[in-house]
Amino acid sequence: MVALRAYLCGMRKSTLIVAAALALPVAVQAQERTSLGTFKSWDAFQIGEGAKAQCFMASVPTNSTPESVNHGQVYATVAHKPGSKIKDEVNVVVGYPFKDGSDLSVTIGGTNLKMFTSGQEAWADSPKKDADLVAAMKRGSEMSIKGTSARGTNTAYNFSLFGFSAAYNAISKACKS
């Protein structure tokens, strides 16, 4: 049992590291990434220093449905990019293209929001919606998202929000905007 748990924890860690790397623009991926820590279900990272610093936190879902399909790598991120005056940028990435023109439904406690999709990613359509998502994530314990693939498959994911606030505090301290 201990060996299985260590294996699964190792898988989660490597998945988050890959997910965090994939979430970055190509120019940023070439820079060295510094871990800001693991905070229960969320990992936090910093890329670059000073005015060029960018900070990200990432998590993978606790479950994915339907179980019968290949979801690929799925993860959610929140980013601060002070040099670009970007704070609280929320992004969801899946391992398949979303249906053109579809929205991703996000539910956190009693908060329901939509994110627009483009290719394999989903984004809030304004900084205010990003801030609303982050505020709900800080208060909540679970984030549920639902989308539709380009093939018409309805998909759903649950993300634990345990550790979210601590990871958020870590990226906010490292990348003050």
Image: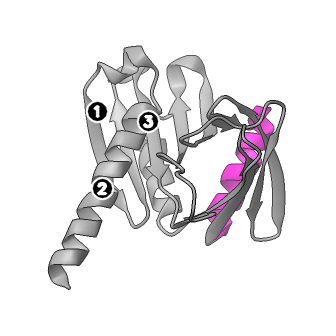
For label 2, the crowd category at 10 Å Cα-Cα, with few meaning under 14, some 14 to 19 and many 20 or more, is some
Q: Whole-Å distance between the Cαs marked 2 and 3?
A: 18 Å
Foreground of the two, 11 or 150: 150
Does residue 6 appear to the left or right of 69 in the view shown?
A: left
Q: Which residue position is annotated with label 1?
A: 33
* Image location of residue 127, percent across then percent down: 75, 34
Q: Whole-Å distance between the Cαs marked 2 and 1?
A: 15 Å
Q: Which residue position is annotated with label 2?
A: 13
Asked if 81 appears above or below 155 in the picture, the reply is: above
Q: Which mark is residue 55?
A: 3
Q: Which element carries disc 2, helix, strand or loop?
A: helix
Give the quarter of the image for residue 136: bottom right
Q: Which element carries disc 1, helix, strand or loop?
A: strand
For the C terminus, give its image quadrant: top right
Query: Is residue 137 magenta-colored?
Result: yes
Does any portion of residue 177 appear in the rendered image?
A: no
Give the quarter of the image for residue 160: bottom right
For label 1, the crowd category at 10 Å Cα-Cα, with few meaning under 14, some 14 to 19 and many 20 or more, is some
* Image location of residue 85, percent across then percent down: 61, 22
* Image location of residue 80, percent across then percent down: 53, 34
Residue type at numbered disc 1: Arg
